[in-house]
Amino acid sequence: MSNPDLLTARDIRKSFVGFKALDSVDFSVRAGEIHALLGENGAGKSTLIKVLTGVLRADSGTFELNGDPITVRDTLHAQQLGIGTVYQEVNLLPNLTVAENLYIGRQPKRFGLVDTRAMHKMARALLADYDIDIDVGAQLSSFSVAVQQLVAIARAVDMSGSVLILDEPTASLDRHEVELLFGVLRKLRDRGLGIVFITHFLDQVYAISDRITVLRNGRLVGTRETASLPRVELVSMMLGRTLAAATEHGRRDAPPHSSRRIAFHDFGRDRSIAPFDMTIHAGEVVGVAGLLGSGRTETARLMFGIDLADCGTIGIDGKPVKIASPRDAVRLGFGLCPEDRKADGIIGDLSVRENIALALQARRGWLRRMSTSDQTELANRFVKALDIRTTDIEKPVKLLSGGNQQKVILARWLATSPRFLILDEPTRGIDVGAHAEIIELINKLCDEGLALLVISSELEEIVAYSTRVRTLRDRAHVGELTGAEISTGSIMQAIAADPGGAK
Amino acid sequence: MRKFMPGLRKAAPQLVSLGVILFFNWLAFPGFFDLRIQDGRLFGSLIDVLNRGAPVAILAIGMTAVIASKGVDLSVGAVMAMAGAVAATMTVAGHPPPIVLLSALAVGVACGLLNGLLVAVLELQPIVATLILMVAGRGIAQLITEGVIVTFNDPGLIFVGTGAFLDLPMPVVLAAALALLAVLVVRRTALGMLIESIGVNRSASTYAGINSRLLIIIVYAFSGFCAALAGIIAAADIRGADANNAGLWLELDAILAVVIGGTSLLGGRFSILMSVLGAIIIQAMNTGILISGFPPEYNLVVKACVIILILLAQSASLGGVAWLPRRIPAAKSKEA
C-alpha cells in the first residue's frame, strides 16, 4: 500500500455546546483504497463525515487534497473538489426518472430546452460502467433500494470522482444486493478512487476494506491495515476495553427452569433480524450483547410487536399466542423500556403521575378510568419504591433527569405487574448514581420472578446481572453464554468471532 | 373547590380579555347589557353574542380534541355546508325532522371518519388530509343542493336554529349541552389523558399500549359530528342551505377559538371549556365591531389586532417567550 494519500485531515476539532464531537482527529484516505470508518454511537463518525463534506465547519484543523491544502466551504464546494457523498437514506428524488436524477441541475440542453434523448443516452452509458441495464426513463422509485443506491453512487462519482464517502450504504440491503454493491465498489477502487465506507457490519468491513479507522468518544483510537487486525482487537478498539483486563465473571447462576416461560421459536423478520429461538424463564435475566446495528433493538421491537415477525411462533407457558401490536404485547404482560427514551418512552408534557399510570390505564381501556386518587396513590408508591427524585408527582416528566425519567418508564411497566420486561439500553445517558440503582433494580426484579431481557452496550453491566447472555452479530443471534462462561472477554470474543470459525 | 381556583387563575387572561371587550362594547352601545324577555325567549346583545357564537363554539369543541391529538381539521366549514345541504334537501323531500337530523349528523360523522382514516391509517399530515374534504366537501354540498339555495319551512328543523328552551335560544342550549357532555366524557373516562398522551408523543403512547390509531379516528369523527350539528343550526337559522356560504372560513375561527383558549397547536394539554370561552371572545369582538359603527372594511384589521393582543397576554401568563423554545429540544433529532 504505497499509494499516496488522496484526502488528508489533520488535527480536526469540532465542539458542540457542551461537548467535543471531534477531539484532534487525524484521518486520511488513499487513492485506490476502501477505508472503513468505525465506531459506536456518538463516536464522531457522522461529525467527521459532515466536516469532510462541508456540511459542518471544523473549529480547527487542516485538510489536504492531493497534497494541496484546501478549505471546504460548503457541500457544493466539496463536490467541486471531488468529494462525493452517498447517505444511508438515498438523497435522490424518487418521483423523477433515473436519468433526471443522474443529471439534475446539469441536464444537456438543446435550444435552451432539456435534451431528454441525449440525457437518456448519457445515463445509459454511465450506468453501463456499473453493469446496470435499466430503463433510465422510468421513475427512480420503481427500482429497489439497492439500484437507487447505485444510481446515487453513479451520480456522486460522475460529479465528484476522486473521493467517495458512503454513510451506511448497506443498512437496508439484503445479502445479494450487498454483493452487487461491493462489486461496484471494488471496480471504483481499482479505478483509483478513495472510498470511505461507514458500516456497523464487521463481516462487511473484513470483506471489502483495506484499512480501518476507529473513533471512540470523538477521539481517534487508531488506523490499521485490515489484513493485520484481528477481529477481537477491532472490537476491543471499538468498545474501549482490552481483553487482558476483561476477566470479570458473572455472579449469577441460572434459576431452576420453571414452567413459567416465554418461548420464541424461529422468530425473525426479513432485513431486520434473522430467525432466532429464545426461551426466557421466570426469574431469569437474559443479557443481549452485540455492536450497534447487530440486531439488538430489532430483536426487542420484534418481540414487543412494534415490527411484525414474518416467521416464527411465540408461546407463553406452553400456550401459543399472537402478537400483532404493542397492545397485544402489553395485554400478555410484556413491557418495553425503549432505547430512545425521549422519542419512544416518556410523554414529556404529561405529569410523572400520568406517565406512571399510562400503560395500566391503556390496558384497562378508556372506559375504566383510574381515578385521580388511584393514580396518585400508584405514582406515590412507585416514586417511593424506585426512589424517583421529583419535587412533585404533578411535575411534567420532561423536567426530570435522564435517570429519573428511566425510572418513571420502569414504574409505568411495573405498575402493570408484567411477566416479561424488555429493557433496551436501560442505563444509557444517565448519571452514575442512577446507573447503579437501575442495575440493582434489575437484580431485584429478577429475584422476584420476573423474566427480563436486557440489551446493553456496557459489557460489565451485562456480566453483572445476566444469567445467560445472547450474542448478536450482523443481524443474527450467533451464540449464547451461560453461567461461568459469562465474562466481558468471552462476550467480546463471541461478538467478534469469524463466521467461518477459523479464528 | 380546591381544583376550581387554579383553573380560574389559568383562565385569567381570557376572562380579562372578554371583560375588556364587553366593556368597549358597552361604551360603543350603552344598551349592550340590557336583557328582556319576549315571546318566552331572552333577548339582548349579550344573548346575541352567545347565540351567534354557538356554531363556532360547537366547532371549537370538536376542534379542541383534534388539536390536542396534534392534528387539525380544516374540513369543518365544508362539513357544515354538507350537513346543512343534506338537512335542507331531505326536509324539502318530505322526511320527518328526526330522520333529517340523524342523517345530517351521520354525514358529519362519516366525513370525520374519512379524515380520521387518512390521518391515522394512511398517516397523511392532518392539514393535507382535511384539506381534501375542505375543498371537495363544498363541491359535494353544491351537488346536493344542485347549485341553488334550498329553502324550507319545516317548523321542527327551524326550531333547532331559532327556537328557545328555558328562555334561552336553542343554539346556545345545544352548544352548552354539548360542551358539558364532552367535558364529562373526556374527563370522567380516560379519553382525555389518552388523547393528550397521543398528542404529546404518539410513538411513546403506542409503545405504552394505547390504541392510538383508533383514538385518532374517534377524535376526527367527533369533530365531524360537531361540524354537522353546527351546520344544521346555521341552516335552520336562515331557513335554507346555502352551499356556497354556509360555514365559510369558520374552520379558521374554530382553530382560533381553540388557540385563544390556550390549547397548543403542538398537541397535548387541552381544555374544552376554554375553547368555548375563546369562541365567545371572538363573537363578542365581531358583535362589538359591528355595533360600534366602524366602517366594515376595518373589521378584519381590528379583529386581527385584538387577537394578537390576546395571544400576547396569554403567552406572558404562561411564562412569556420562554415557553416556546422549551418545546423545541424535544423535537430535535436524536443523533449526536
Image (tube, coloured by chain):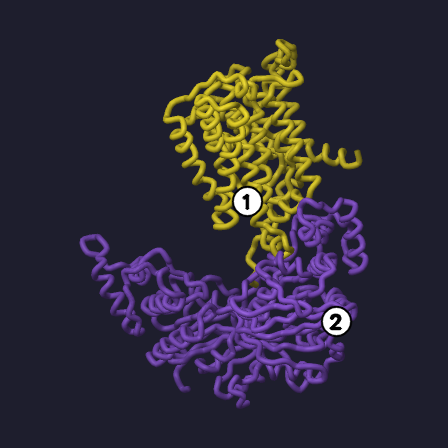
What chain is tagged by disc 2? A
On the image, numbered disc 2 is attached to which residue?
A: A283
What residue is rendered at 54% in x and 22% in y?
Answer: B286
Q: For residue A73, which quarter of the picture?
A: bottom left
What residue is rendered at 70% in x and 35% in y?
Answer: B10
Q: Position of residue B300 (x, y in %)?
A: 49, 25
What mark, if any, has residue B217 been given in the picture?
1
Q: Position of residue A96 (x, y in %)?
A: 33, 56
Q: Position of residue B194 (x, y in %)?
A: 64, 47
State the yellow chain: B
Mark 2: which amino acid? Gly
Shade representing chain A: purple
What chain is tagged by disc 1? B
What residue is rendered at 39% in x and 29% in y?
Answer: B142
Q: Residue furthest left?
A: A111
Q: Secondary structure at mark 2?
A: loop
Quadrant in which the C terminus of chain A appears = bottom right
Whether residue A194 is visible: no
What residue is rendered at 74% in x and 47% in y?
Answer: A370
In the displayed structure, A352 sits above or below A291; it is: above
Whether residue A378 is visible: yes
Q: For residue A32, which quarter of the picture?
A: bottom left
Q: Residues within 10 Å of mark 2 (few under 14, many from 20)?
A: many
In the displayed structure, B172 sits above or below A479; it is: above
Q: Secondary structure at mark 1?
A: helix
Is A217 in front, or is B5? B5
Q: Is residue B118 left or right of residue A398?
A: left
Quadrant in which the N terminus of chain A appears = bottom left
Is B215 in front, or is B203? B215
